Amino acid sequence: MAPSFPQFNPMRLRSYIFRLPLCTRVLIAAIIGLWIATIPFPWLREFGRLEPAKMDLTQMHRLNLFPLMHLNFFHMIFNLIAVTPLLERFESEYGTLVSLALFTGPFGTIPGGVYTLLEKFVFRSNTVVMGASVWVFLLLSAEVMKTHKTNPSFNVGPYKIPTWTTPLILVLVTSFIVPNVSLIGHLCGAGLGYLWATGYIKFLVPPEKILRWLETKLNLLGRLPHYVSVDQKTYGRYGVLPSSNTPVPLSARTPDGGQRLGP
């Protein structure tokens, strides 16, 4: 009997895309839109890429744009496949406003700034970088630190490998098998992910009181589809959880006044 392989289901992919939260959609749209724009306007790629030798106070836009710019179609597609589920998971946990503030700000400017300083003053080089892979390794590092708490290590043959080192191993492997990849750039992204997971840079997030006030004042939950609230405990993932005013039959109640689950 021939082995059966999982078949690609376009309906599942379509359903997954339609369920993506708002900030993830915006960032994906920006990546695709900028790649399309570079076809008639190829100078946009030079305008947005991170080039250490050109960095000064007039070129700070590069720190925000370089994760959104890509060298070609395949570079963009591979990065989108890798970063989309990680972005979706991050936004589902922290909310749309937090994600938007971080990924349009410090999650690009900090690793980009550290990379620029290292290239200019330590390595005396001018390696140009662009692409969302810096976010891929940032988010992988943040996720693996959660896994490390429950599974501190995994076995590879006779060796025990600490779980938290997984992104660093992937950075090294990627730098060897993929041409024109910046090892230092990926390490800068991974380093920021570790700092985020350990809580040392949580001050980068705007105060929760301000975020709650904005959500309420602007009625973001009611106006924006696929918006993820800051207050996950109250609102769930996409707004206020549905409630029912239907009375619970006495036969369905437990002796302590709760509701019984099941028949």
Image (cartoon, rainbow, N blue to C red):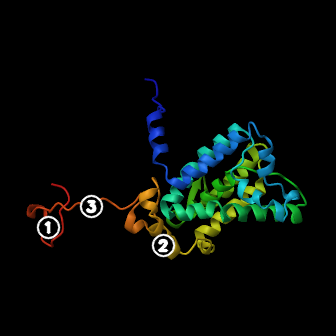
User: Residue most toward the left?
Assistant: 251
Residue 254 percent location from the top left of the image = 14, 67
Q: Horizontal and vertical percent for residue 235?
A: 39, 64
Residue 9 position in % (x across, y down): 46, 33
Q: Nearer the viewer, residue 213 or 35?
A: 213
Image quadrant in which you'd find residue 39: top right
Q: How crowded is mark 2: few (under 14 residues within 10 Å), some or many (20 or more)?
A: few
| Residue matched to label 1 | 254
Decide: few, some or many residues near mark 1? Use Cα within 10 Å; few <14, some 14-19, many ≥20: few
Residue underneath mark 2? 213
Which secondary structure, mark 3? loop
First reached walking from the N terminus: tag 3 or tag 2 = 2
Residue 220 visible to the viewer: yes
First in residue order: circle 3 vs circle 1: 3
Q: In this view, does 213 lie to the left or right of 131?
A: left
Report the amino acid beneath label 3.
Answer: Ser
In this image, 109 relative to 250: left or right? Answer: right
| Helix, strand or loop under label 2 | helix
